[in-house]
Image: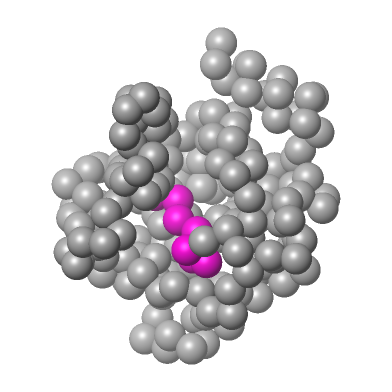
């Protein structure tokens, strides 16, 4: 019932499409770091939730701890949210790697920009999480111009960070978010 409703909203009402290597991701990838780019608006959240329901996969996300306070905390946790204290100096990479080790299936979606505003450089935490947990990075577009979410093939980080980031960032070339000036 939930999946049928999500498909109706995603495909029929909103007119979005999903393509790329989503079937591989849907069927074969039990653990992954998913990077959703570009993250320019709060609209990205419900598009991601809808895609997750359409594909019938569980994906967790990290949000600022303030989102998890009453009255919305229960809602975000039920959707797979994990609160993050951005002020605390705890090692977030190690904490998330631990979640990968503790779970047979664990996929986490992150926005490498770290904000909805335009950035010159991505944050690198997602990369080091994938590397330490020995899981692939799956790239996921939030292309509002074409109303399309595209999944990449699984990408395993190498020892060449600079080369890897050229590949990762290149996947999102010409993708426009909800607010194009932030893309």
On-image quarter of the N terminus: top right
Does 168 appear in magenta?
Answer: no
Q: Is residue 6 above or below residue 150?
A: above
Residue 107 visible, this angle: no
Residue 3 visible, this angle: yes
**Magenta part of the chain:** 107-114
Of all residues, the one furthest to the top in this rendering is 1
User: Going by the image, does 88 lie left or right of 49?
Assistant: left
> Residue 112 at x, y = what percent?
49, 65
Residue drawn 54% across the image and 35% down it:
49
Residue drawn 45% across the image and 51% down it:
109
Report the colour scheme.
one colour
> Residue 54 at x, y = what percent?
60, 29
Q: Nearer the viewer, residue 102 or 143?
A: 143
Does 109 appear in magenta?
Answer: yes
Give the mark count.
Answer: 0
> Residue 147 at x, y = what percent?
78, 45
User: Going by the image, does 158 lie left or right of 103?
Assistant: right
On-image quarter of the C terminus: bottom right
Q: Is residue 180 above or below residue 178?
A: below
Residue drawn 56% across the image and 41% down it:
45
């Amino acid at each position: 019932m939930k999946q049928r409703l999500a498909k109706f909203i995603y495909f029929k009402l909103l007119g979005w499409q999903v393509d790329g290597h989503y079937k591989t991701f849907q069927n074969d990838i039990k653990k992954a770091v998913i990077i959703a780019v570009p993250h320019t608006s709060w609209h990205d959240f419900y598009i991601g939730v809808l895609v997750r329901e359409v594909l019938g996969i569980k994906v967790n996300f990290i949000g600022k701890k303030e989102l998890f306070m009453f009255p919305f905390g229960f809602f975000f946790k039920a959707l797979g949210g994990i609160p993050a204290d951005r002020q605390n100096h705890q090692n977030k990479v190690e904490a998330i790697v631990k979640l990968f080790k503790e779970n047979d299936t664990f996929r986490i979606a992150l926005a490498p920009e770290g904000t909805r505003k335009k950035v010159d450089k991505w944050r690198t935490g997602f990369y080091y999480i994938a590397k330490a947990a020995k899981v692939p990075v799956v790239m996921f577009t939030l292309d509002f111009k074409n109303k399309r979410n595209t999944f990449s093939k699984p990408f395993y980080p190498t020892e060449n960070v600079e080369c890897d980031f050229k590949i990762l960032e290149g996947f999102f070339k010409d993708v426009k978010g909800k607010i194009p000036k932030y893309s």
